[in-house]
Amino acid sequence: MTKSVRLEEGDASKVLVPVGSNKGVSVMDLVLRLVGIAGTLGAAIAMGTNEQTLPFFTRFVVFNAEYDDFRSFRLFVIVNAIVCAYFVLTLPLSIVHIMRSAARGSRILLIIMDTVMLALLTAGASAAASIVYLAHNGNTSTNWLPVCQQYGDFCQGASGSLIGSFGAVVVFILIILLGAIALSRHAKRVVL
Amino acid sequence: MTKSVRLEEGDASKVLVPVGSNKGVSVMDLVLRLVGIAGTLGAAIAMGTNEQTLPFFTRFVVFNAEYDDFRSFRLFVIVNAIVCAYFVLTLPLSIVHIMRSAARGSRILLIIMDTVMLALLTAGASAAASIVYLAHNGNTSTNWLPVCQQYGDFCQGASGSLIGSFGAVVVFILIILLGAIALSRHAKRVVL
């Protein structure tokens, strides 16, 4: 069976628009970005307000733990804030993709930026996670004692805020997957 | 200007192959994967053989540090080994892409798997990095003392092995970028 396809240059969008079945993918992309905003914003706020002062103190020392004492936790808050802002900034583009199902260049741009942000967020979340693990379990060979017995609330707050951040990592992987699917469908439809 | 394009179903590759300018991108992809193998293999070996026993000991205690004492470092070795194996396994696919410049489905599959591996490797590298940072600087509020004065060689070995791993993270981002570019060129060429 032979098909003959007529394409006019500069008019390619007209050929591509009617297919429209990338719409579902684009809507899912938008929803996932909203989930990502909630996750990273929640994680940044939970960690940023995490502080515990113990009820006993000496004349010179107040026993106090806050996220700012740990470089990894500070990094965690900054990274989550950056990624949250990135999600907000890409919302308009995501909405444009729902309307212009055949957009290609902007989809590729999004995939690349999403990838960089995925790496950034994963780095921040894992660095914080390894400190949380250490706070829970300590390390005998370096004589770092677990501190979660004393700073129970602080540890719980830090552990909880990791959830939002790792949730956003999963969201990013799904978004990149959707972007690749949208690009592939697009190409397939042009060929046939 | 109007162009007429004839496409035969099931024979699309014949129409697309002659463009061939994805070849450069595919060769670069192969070279980057080889760099990634070197980086992750080096990182895994450097960390996996990292051990230091201090020259003084008591009757009951030998002061010894090895990567296996730290969960994050163990994770680091495992993750780097997995990613290295993944790079090796995807080499044939990368070579196929050099010959079949128009391959689309396999490119998308690679982008998705690369993304997952990027997240995995970044997580492992950052978790190890935050422990290395702690070993260098310690943390006052939890009374974790820096141990790099005693375990100088161990710390240096751990810091060095991070380089290979973070190098591989950059390689992954470039590979995903190249994959997206290859997909976009492909689509563009079909439309015009």
Image (cartoon, coloured by chain):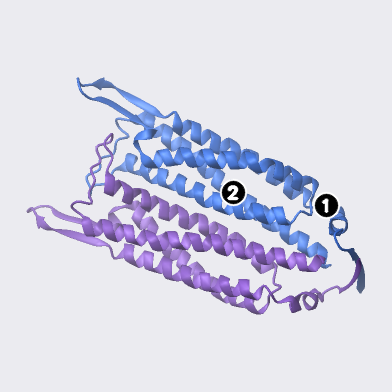
Chain colours: A purple, B blue
Q: Where is residue B69 in the image (x, y as percent from the top left)?
A: 34, 35
Q: In which quarter of the image is the N terminus of chain B?
A: bottom right
Q: Is residue B164 visible?
A: no
Q: Looking at the picture, do discs 2 and 1 lie on one chain?
A: yes
Q: Which residue is drawn at 46% across and 45% down?
A: B124
Residue holding disc 1 = B20
Three-letter amino acid code at disc 2? Phe
Q: Where is residue A187 in the image (x, y as percent from the top left)?
A: 75, 65
Q: Residue at x 80, y 45 (%)?
A: B99
Q: Residue A105 carries which label?
A: none
Chain of the residue where label 1 is placed in the rendered structure? B
Q: How far apart are marks 2 and 1 (CA)?
A: 24 Å
Q: In this view, does B15 lie to the left or right of A94?
A: right
* Front residue of this view, candidates A1 and B44: A1
Q: Do the residues labelled 2 and 1 touch (CB within 8 Å)?
A: no
Q: Which residue is drawn at 84% across and 56% down?
A: B13
Chain of the residue where label 2 is placed in the rendered structure? B
Residue holding disc 2 = B172
* Front residue of this view, candidates A122 and A5: A5
Q: Where is residue A114 in the image (x, y as percent from the top left)?
A: 56, 61
Mark closer to the chain start, 2 or 1: 1
